[in-house]
Amino acid sequence: MKPRSIPSQPSRAPSTPSPAGDPSTFSLNRRAVLAAGIAACSLIADRSSAIQPFHPNLLQDASASMNITKAPFGTLPDGTAVSLWTLSNSRGDLLKMTDYGALIVSIEVPDRQGNRTNVTLGFPKLDGYLERHPYFGATVGRFCNRIAKGKFSLDGTTYSLAQNNGPNHLHGGEVGFDKLVWKTEELRGDNYVGLRFSLLSPDGQEGYPGNLSVQAEYLWDNEAKLTIRFTATTDKATPINLTNHAYFNLGGWQGGVIHNHQLQLQCAKYLAIDETMIPTGALADVAGTPLDFRTATPIGQRIAQLTATNGYDHCFVVDGQPGTLRACGMVVDPKSGRGMEIQTTQPGVQLYTGNFLNGSDSNGGFKLHEAFCLETQNFPDAPNQPTFPNSILKPGEKFEQTTSYRFLVVADK
Ligand code: GLA
């Protein structure tokens, strides 16, 4: 069937041409300050790749202004009302989110010609999200990704979680944070609009210990940068790992397979996994493998070599110091010209290429490899792996992680 998703926005003409910038000066990791009011940004281009130079454009809808609107999105079977917020930045780029699952319903950003289209997979109505779906756009917790055999031990107690992915626990269990209605507040700043989602996950929910108070802030600024900030506190030690599970297709939600998207990751290592996708504990070099994206490479170029997983479904170690906001990677769709730059404080990033998308209704009609996810997170199974970054939040501590996805437009080759 045809994908059922959010219709794209009507085209709007750009009113501002591309700012000047000397493409010849761009090289790997070099920071460049761009003209026309664009802030300094890390440009991750490779002289040898087909996608350089990057030219972030200002594509302005003259009638746009920063705005937040709220509309009904549907009701849950128990009658709970669910809302849809539309956040517009001053350029007219749109972020739509719902309080069900604190999930991203659409992100509408311009292509090279200024046509705004939704670049995420999702459903047009709440109903689609109420069925078991592939976590489209969702805020995932209490522990995203896998915990081996659904078990971990803390302070001498062994906890058992749902084994909802073969023998393992996945994405917080049967009723994870993606299936809860979050309390929502609107946020407004000088150059952004945003939403703060919060919830209290009670002691024992899905088998996890401790009353966990969680906040997920989504800020949408005037440079089309989406900043996601997670914070949490607990009254008992508990594992925690939060991510957003947006599925991107920079060619637009109807853009088809993403094999031509160029990906560059600031990741020299990845986590080796066993046949149930649990890390073995080894940090392996990407060099000489299909996981080497240190220079921009089409996602599809080596994807057929990943037969065991039917595509990419791997956690990469983000270079640099976890806890500091640093470059994670960049993706460009050369055809539309849309690009996305990612920064994160998280230790890792899961590259997932929609290997389970099968065209079914519960998948929104989307098929194999019609999107990619870059889920920034702590390492899978961290509660059981003493050599991995700490994933246990204790009373008196504050969990805090930030990730940003900045959308831009690159010059034609
Ligand atoms: C993550 C996992 C995948 C899959 C998807 C959701 O990316 O690593 O294996 O579970 O979520 O379908």
Image: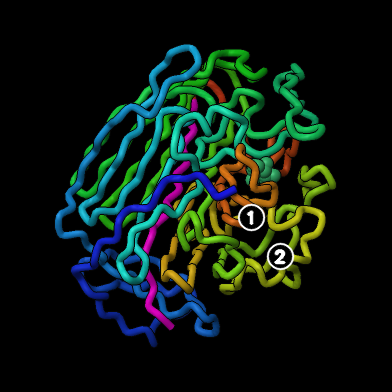
Label 1 neighbour load within 10 Å: few <14, some 14-19, many 20+:
many
Instruction: Measuring from the top left, give residue 185's x and y in whole percent.
Output: 30, 28
Task: Report if the CB atoms under discs 1 and 2 are less than 8 Å apart.
Answer: yes
Closest to the observer: 297 or 253?
253
Residue drawn where x is 47% and y is 73% of the image: 335
**Ligand 1 shown in quarter:** top right
Q: Main secondary structure of the magenta part?
A: strand
Position above or below: 12 against 188? below
The structure residue drawn at horizontal position 81% and vertical position 47%, both measured from the top left corner, is: 280
Residue 199 within the magenta-colored segment of the rendering: no
Q: Which of marks 1 and 2 is nearer the N terminus?
A: 2
Drawn side of residue 178 relative to residue 100, left or right: right
User: Where does the image place residue 389, in percent across and percent down from the top left?
Assistant: 64, 42
Instruction: Read off the residue under disc 2.
Output: 303
The answer to whether residue 230 is visible is no
* In the displayed structure image, the side of residue 65 where residue 248 appears, left or right: right
Residue span colored magenta: 397-413
The residue under the point 47% across, 71% down is 44
Residue matched to label 1: 353
Mark 2 residue element: helix
| Residue 221 x, y percent position in the rendering | 28, 50
Residue at mark 1 to residue at mark 2: CA–CA distance: 9 Å
